[in-house]
Amino acid sequence: MKKILCFIAAIWFPSVSIWGIDYRLVPNPYNPAKNGFLQISKKDGSNLNAGRYSLRVHDYNLKLVYQDTFDLTAAGTIRYPGITQNGSKLAPGLYFLQIVSSDSAAQTTSSDFTKLLVQ
């Protein structure tokens, strides 16, 4: 029952974060074999500010399956290829993306989890 509720929540609120700041994931639901890169931007679709972003991808059991750091020298989006740390494509299921940012404009650090449904 818990998995069904999480699945329904991911479909109804695909770009809503669990805590705090919201990020937009496009496309969501996501298929790494068909969609190429997952684009991560601000919730309103605008570019992220320049800065360093750490992306951590956790599976349904919150096991870390991927992590990387992205340095945006100018405003832009994070492009995640939909892979695990060993290079294989994400299996279908619900994932939680943790985005830790050091925003050069605001000089602040924030951390947030956002849901991703992989088909």
Image (tube, helix red, strand yellow):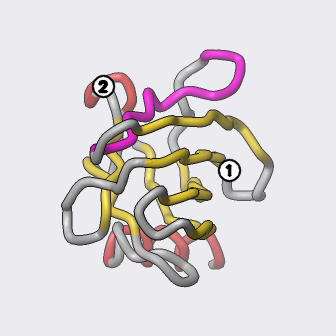
Assign the magenta stretch its main secondary structure.
loop
What's the mark number on residue 84? none
Q: Quadrant of residue 65?
A: top right
Is residue 82 magenta-colored? Answer: yes
Q: Nearer the viewer, residue 5 or 10?
A: 10
Query: Percent from the top left, x then y, of residue 41?
Result: 31, 55
Is residue 31 magenta-colored? Answer: no
Query: Percent from the top left, x then y, of residue 113?
Result: 58, 67
> Please, what is the three-letter code of the amino acid marked with disc 2?
Gly
Q: Which residue range is magenta in the image? A: 76-87
> Please, what is the three-letter code of the amino acid marked with disc 1?
Asp
Q: Residue furthest left?
A: 45
Circle 2: element type: loop
Residue at (57% x, 82% y) in the render:
19
Query: Percent from the top left, x then y, of residue 59?
Result: 68, 50
Foreground tag (2 vs 1): 2
Residue at (39% x, 65% y) in the render:
23
Q: Is residue 118 above or below residue 33?
A: below
Residue behind mark 2: 36
Q: Nearer the viewer, residue 58 or 5?
A: 58
Count of residue discs: 2
Q: Quadrant of residue 31?
A: top left
Q: Is residue 17 above or below residue 80?
A: below
Q: Is residue 52 above or below residue 89?
A: below
Query: Percent from the top left, x then y, of residue 55?
Result: 59, 46
Residue at (35% x, 68% y) in the render:
14
Residue behind mark 1: 59
Give the position of the N terminus as an image quadrant. Answer: bottom right
Give the position of the C terminus as an image quadrant. Answer: top left
